[in-house]
Amino acid sequence: MSRGATPAVILEVTGLIGSALVQDLGRPGLAHLGIPASGAADVGALRSGNRMLGNADSAAGLEVMGSITLRAHAPLLVAVTGASGPVRLDGEHVPHTPLPLATGSELHLGPPRRGLRTYVSVRGGVDLPPVLGSRAHDTLSGIGPAPLAVGTRLPIGVAPRQVPTTSVEPGREIAHPGPQGLVMCDLLPGPRQDWVSDPQTLHANTYRVSELADRVGTRLVGPPLTRIRTEELASEGVVRGAVQIPPDGAPVILGADHPVTGGYPVVAVLTEAASDALAQARAGTVLRFRSQHLRWPRARSRPGTS
Amino acid sequence: MSALDVLPGGERALLIATDGAAQARAVAAAVRAQPHLEVQDVVPAARTVLVTVAEPRALPALREALAGLEVDPEAREEPRRLTLEVVYDGEDLHDVADAAGMSVQEVVRRHTAGEYVVEFIGFAPGFAYLTGLDEALHLPRLATPRTSVPAGSVAIAGPYAAVYPRSSPGGWRLLGHCDAVLFDADADPPTPWRAGTRVRFTP
């Protein structure tokens, strides 16, 4: 909620190593104009932080890759979700629960030990002017509030009526490698499976997240798929989580800032939860893909069928 | 009306394959006209329409609606018309003339004679792919794309013409430039064209 004429409540960036972007749920609905949805790379983590604070799901927060120090210029309530690392409030280690910051308090988030992206939600949300309906920064088109830097002062909106929960949301931990050191990613069929001879290659092998990974897409290292059709595919609409197969057969998974159309065949699509998990997977993380099947409602039954 | 060719697109999307761009626009219009579907994006392209819904639980209803969708092939086309003034001073203008085996004046004449239609918008905000380019000017993209193409560049590649709304990397051949604002995030609408908009260029 915007404050209007009252003085802005400020959260200031006093230290930053790496990058910090304002993110929310993005600006879907504009793809027909070539405008990507963008939004938090790990949507579940941002949502979790917002809900903990009683914010609307659409409240804007910070997406941090690295470490950040923030100073509150008024009392604020903050939640830290996503990748976990050391959190210090005025020098003291604190757990990741909703954190009350007094005026002048300094919150320091160290680099995460696990995962890639840390989310800082603030009760009231980051109140910068929305661009095309959202405060998300799209790294490909540059639309949205500029990336944060030391000295950035963020206005915070009026606190919502909804009270914050007093407990950490259970069960919503970022995916981390299981006993075999793998992160499972659930996949659904994509529209262009017939462009490769061997779509099952994705499930039969493991793949590693390469260094070529950002908010636009993630290139994987592993057994290539074999393109049967090598002509150019006419550009078509694509979604976050789409697994594209370029001519060299090495899968590329589209991220939050993917362009709205693509010319490489999409043979599978990650579930939303798997896209969130991928957003936390550092270079070198090993992925195993698992097939999911959407359950369609039964067709109108005919006599003799169950 | 024959059944739509509906392909899977993940938890929240379906891809409809069509015979071409005009049918894609007609299908897109028919989908948008459906109430209660929680549709989030409808993206027509050269031979497809991508439809996304806001939540996975809305996908079965979308699939069912597509199974029975009535598409009017004569649906009134998108009414916008755009005329863009071009200064023909592009870096590739002379190379294009040579490759096409004609004078620069002839290239300009043929480019401005075209009656273009926005086939779809993709690649970047406000980047419209225009069909209707004279066949003599159908040339491949540059072997080495430019790292930066100036905003407003009027360009061609293969069967398409386009204007770069903003500076970006690009491999299209540059014929000239145009001052019209084709993308402004603060404007409403942010871009003046849509799939189906008719476009002309004037010198």
Image (cartoon, rainbow, N blue to C red):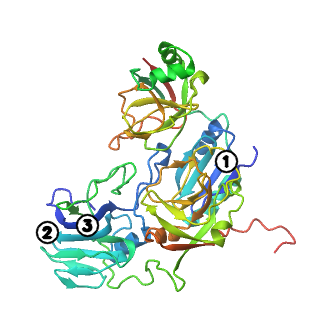
Residue name at image x 42 percent, y 68 percent: A42
Q: Position of residue B139 (x, y in %)?
A: 56, 29
Name the amino acid, label 2.
Answer: His
Q: Is residue A120 above or below residue A253?
A: below
The label shown at residue A272 is none
Residue name at image x 70 percent, y 62 percent: A198
The label shown at residue A17 is 3
Residue receiving disc 1: A230
Q: Position of residue B123 (x, y in %)?
A: 48, 44
The residue lying toward the viewer, choosing from B67 and A82, is A82
Residue receiving disc 2: A73
Name the amino acid, label 1.
Answer: Thr
The residue lying toward the viewer, choosing from B140 and B11, is B140
Q: Is circle 3 on the same chain as circle 2?
A: yes
Give SS at disc 1. loop
Q: Quadrant of the N terminus of chain A?
A: bottom left
Residue name at image x 30 percent, y 69 percent: A66
On the rendered structure, is B96 left or right of A187?
A: left
Name the amino acid, label 3.
Answer: Ile
